[in-house]
Amino acid sequence: MMECAVVGKFFSPIFSSSRSVVVEKRKLPSLHKKIKFCSSKFKMKATQAETHLSQEAELQAEKRGSSTGVGVGELIWPSPSDGTPFWKKDFPSSGVSPEVPADVKDSDPKHIIHVTAEMAPIAKVGGLGDVVTGLARACLSRGHTVDIMLPFYECIQKQHIKDLTVITKYNSYHDGNWVPTNAYRGVVSGIPVIFIEPSNQFFKGQYVYGGSFNELEAYLFFSRACLEWMQVTSTQPDIIHVHEWQTGALPLLYWDIYHHLSLKPRIVLTIHNMEHYGECSKEQLSKSGLEGSVYASIDKAIDDRTIGHNPERLSLLKGGIVYSNAVVTVSPTYLKETLCTGWLASTLVRNRDKYFGILNGIDTTMWNPATDIFLPVKFNDQKPEGKKFCKYYVQRGLGLASEGTQDGNHVPDITYKAPLVVCITRLVPQKGLHLISHAIKRIEELGGQMVILGKASDAQVATEFECLAKLHNQGPCIRILLMFSEELSHLLYAAADMVLVPSIYEPCGLTQMIGMRYGAVPVVRKTGGLADTVFDMDDQSNHNRANGFVFEGIDEGSLICALDRAFTYYREKPDEWNGILKKVMEVDNSWNNTAGKYVELYNSKSVRL
Ligand code: ADP
């Protein structure tokens, strides 16, 4: 089993005197009976009974609707000059009957605690947040008890948390001190969450990442504070599920310290992106109470590339891989890629027997065009008409050309043949920045429209895209919106004819799956999870699964070829295009499909032993 390092500061005299704790009665809501969205923005409901609209509501929606029968009669079409941006409204969740969620119950319910830096929608930067929320919800509905432990970031909007209460006041160790810490319990989007709030400056600031504190130390603190909370409250989950480098130290802390106290769970690590590996010095790791130098060996946490350098460095992600009972990455193809390339490959090969590839799902409660409160008109694969109105709504709101509007007539001309391509992404090199900017040019040449919704953390990338925005945003066909907006992303998926994902590498990718559910045909580069979820229309050998347009090269020519083919289908083969549209909306990329694989893993011998 796991080797233990020297226990370091854990046994210092300060420990016993400072481990003071006030534990308030822990309220466990009855988790799997009812799951309700509770924030004002996320009012959707997920119980089987509640997800069905009443017949009365449907009738009203039909009455309100125009001759299209999709409820657009009372819509006020937006414009770029509106005081409030058009995506800042929400609409009643009615108009199309939502699907019935799968009703699978597992025979051996477990208690799973996710320890994570992100959770959608309250602390979401990218796919990690979506995945944690979606997997947690799927496991709750299968009968498991699930909690999410999250730093109480200052930027979290408290109105999205239901029943927020302090449940524990305790101290957690960091850098020679025991830091007074509060644990809160609340419910977010129907899921129980425990928020960890240290009394120091960690997690302060306007954003999830990039505050003025030392991020590495903050997550080291958080990893330990979660275990400390379990220890002082005698919480004994079956599984602690950690994610990414931010919680990579938790397995080390667990086997080195907490397993010797009272905790008995097993640890599962999901790696969502191998690029971020949590570079850490021995001294920094020691601040968590571990003895950093003990982990500086090739079979533990040393960053292999730094061996023999002065100073050598550690990697929290590598430590997490070595010290977890099972390691998952987010698609089968990314699993293969990571076993062959990158400096972590040798560690993954050494740990191959506990390394698994499980494709992410999407949270179909959150991402459901039939109930989505951000959409002015709902739709689904059975009633797709509403999608055209969403496209028109977005075109009007962004001031994009939309034929049939010049005479003030608010009925969209749905025959307007400019396909709308969206790209919703973090603007980082991984996402194929040069291909994204080249797509703008090509789509304009082809007479299409493109909207990019993206946020850059790097100043140079931000400047480049700001220049592109200045160049294009006054014209009729391109919009580059440099921000993060959950609301607008929903509207864009609903409006889009195509979703572009030209990533250089992509562990799983959610935007192609969300796009499909909202009737946007994916145009993607063949890598990682994109290769597992999108299959080319012109690949005769795989016609049954064909659902999009795929290119392989990282050059502009490869991208152009795929875009050109997609535009040809859209414009010249309407029947086939409608066929693809129906097909992508019918694909089941939900967690119903893949959460069971995680449950199997939680139950497997490799985890339980
Ligand atoms: P990654 O995790 O690498 O960012 P994924 O495709 O797995 O990529 O997940 C991206 C998630 O973040 C999707 O839910 C997508 O809609 C969302 N997203 C990315 N950029 C933005 C943005 N600028 N505004 C709103 N949502 C965004």
Image (cartoon, grey):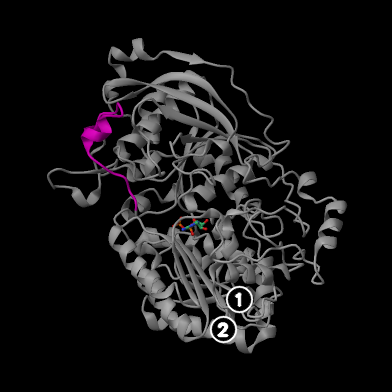
How far across and how far down the image is residue 495, in percent?
61, 68
Q: Secondary structure at mark 1?
A: loop
Mark 2: few/some/many CA within 10 Å (<14, 14-19, 20+) = some
User: Mark 1 near mark 2, Cβ–Cβ under 8 Å?
Assistant: yes
Q: Any mark on residue 195, and which?
A: none
**With 572 as the anchor, is 386 left or right in this view?**
right
How far across and how far down the image is residue 570, in percent?
61, 83
User: Residue shown at 41%/43% (left/top)?
Assistant: 208
Identify which amino acid the numbered label 2 is placed on.
Asp
Q: Which residue is mark 2?
A: 538
| Above or below, 416 relative to 399 | below
| Above or below, 76 relative to 406 | above
Does any portion of residue 263 appear in the rendered image? Answer: no
**With 117 as the anchor, is 26 left or right in this view?**
right
Identify which amino acid the numbered label 1 is placed on.
Ala
Residue 292 within the segment the image draws in magenta? yes
**Hey, which quadrant is residue 513 in on the image?**
bottom right
Q: Secondary structure at mark 2?
A: loop
**Hey, which quadrant is residue 252 in on the image?**
top left
Q: Which residues are magenta?
A: 276-294
| Above or below, 136 relative to 87 | above
- In the image, 266 versus 403, the foreground residue is 403
**Hey, which quadrant is residue 87 in on the image?**
bottom right
Asked if disc 1 is less than 8 Å from ligand 1, the answer is no
Question: Please, which residue is most extreme toward the top here?
Answer: 17
**With 4 as the anchor, is 81 left or right in this view?**
right
Closer to the chain start, of discs 1 and 2, is: 2
- In the image, 216 versus 461, the foreground residue is 461
User: Residue shown at 76%/67% (left/top)?
Assistant: 383
How far across and how far down the image is residue 448, in percent?
53, 81
Mark 1: few/some/many CA within 10 Å (<14, 14-19, 20+) = many
Q: Which residue is mark 1?
A: 546
